[in-house]
Image: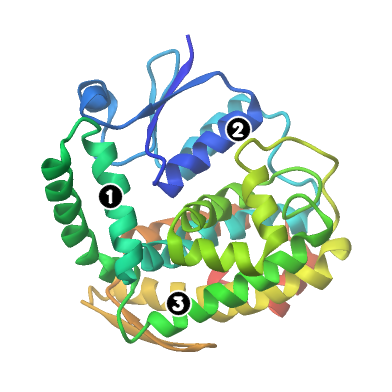
Amino acid sequence: MNHRLFGAEMSPYSVKVRAYLRYKGIAHDWIPRTGSSQAEYQKYARVPIIPLVVTPEGQSLQDSTPIIDALEALHPEPSVHPDDPVNRFLSALLEEFGDEWGNKWMFHYRWAREVDQIASAGRLARMRDPQADAGGFEAIREQVRARMVERVWFVGSSPATAPLIESSFEQAIARLDEHLRDRPYLFGGRPSFGDFGLWGQLYCAWTDPTPGALIEGRAPHLLDWIHRMLWPRAEGPFENWPALQATLMPFLRESVGGLFAPWTLANEAAVADARDSFAVDLAAGPFTQKPQKYHAKSLAALRARYRAQPADPDLQAVLTEAGCLAMLGD
């Protein structure tokens, strides 16, 4: 019996897990979460989120990062964790960055402009009711559009923060395009934990009109990686940090250390203080949003990964240069 993966093509966390299952060669059935699958989904889901994986033994797994962690323990080869301790943690850091800051890019672009709103709401409407007639489809589309546009605050998207989110996206895809010019994956010849987390967001962004045009027009090597990660495979070994440093460090410094690290610390403090909103000065400018409680938990999990690794002065030096050490409690 196969694993059963309940998800949606427009869910970055769902396609992240699907790509991982494909890479590992874990037999699975992809089950779009629609009305016809709802009863089975509800039988196993502990919380109303996707992706949901049901193992052949009937165990249910939810939340993309814990799903991959659980399956990696059972299917350790080929490993998605680089052997080099520096790259091993950087991969985990990029996985977290993708899930949390990368989601800001994806979600903002999907609902910020009319062209993307109409395209995305229409795709979601067809997923919800593939048999709807023209009138029914339009009604569902507009209902979805209105509901989702009202939710952009969740990722901090607003007229005030839109320029920062968009400029950080454009800068990031340029840096990643240069990094991926001479290698198939972020850490060399095979996909890592970090590839899956970052790819899920960028793949979904690519499927939407505005960010898709930016990627296709400006980042051909990144686009190749997006295509490659649909069916990832090992094409060679992981590289070591010195081979990656010249092109990966600029991305780490600007996107992770300059934006994500100060934002995540400010978010953590706001959650602890039960504030309704918080403001933080990032390298690219001021940023204001409502706290994200889940991210405070995922930050704690990232810190646990960091503490679980043996102390490594090379890793500390890299994290210091990237501006990321403070977020880990050091």
Marks 2 and 1, how far apart at CA = 36 Å
Residue 144 placement, left or right of 214: left
Circle 1: element type: helix
Label 2 Cα neighbours within 10 Å, binned few <14 / some 14-19 / many ≥20 = some
Going by the numbered disc 1, the residue's amino acid type is Gly
Picture quadrant where residue 103 is located: bottom left
Name the residue furthest front: 134
Q: Is residue 77 above or below residue 246?
A: above
Q: Is residue 159 above or below residue 315?
A: below
Picture quadrant where residue 36 is located: top left
Residue topped by disc 3? 165
Circle 2: element type: helix
Q: Position of residue 190 (x, y in %)?
A: 76, 43
Q: Position of residue 52 (x, y in %)?
A: 37, 32
- Asked whether the viewer can see residue 143, the reply is yes
Q: Which mark is first along the chain, 1 or 2?
A: 2
Mark 1 or 3: in front is 1
Residue drawn at 61 percent across, 77 percent down: 171
Marks 2 and 3, how far apart at CA = 33 Å
Going by the numbered disc 2, the residue's amino acid type is Glu
Marks 1 and 3, how far apart at CA = 24 Å
Circle 3: element type: helix
Residue topped by disc 2? 72
Going by the numbered disc 3, the residue's amino acid type is Ile
Residue 149 placement, left or right of 258: left
Mark 2 or 1: in front is 1
Question: Of 57 and 151, which appears nearest the observer?
Answer: 151
In the picture, the disc for residue 122 is 1
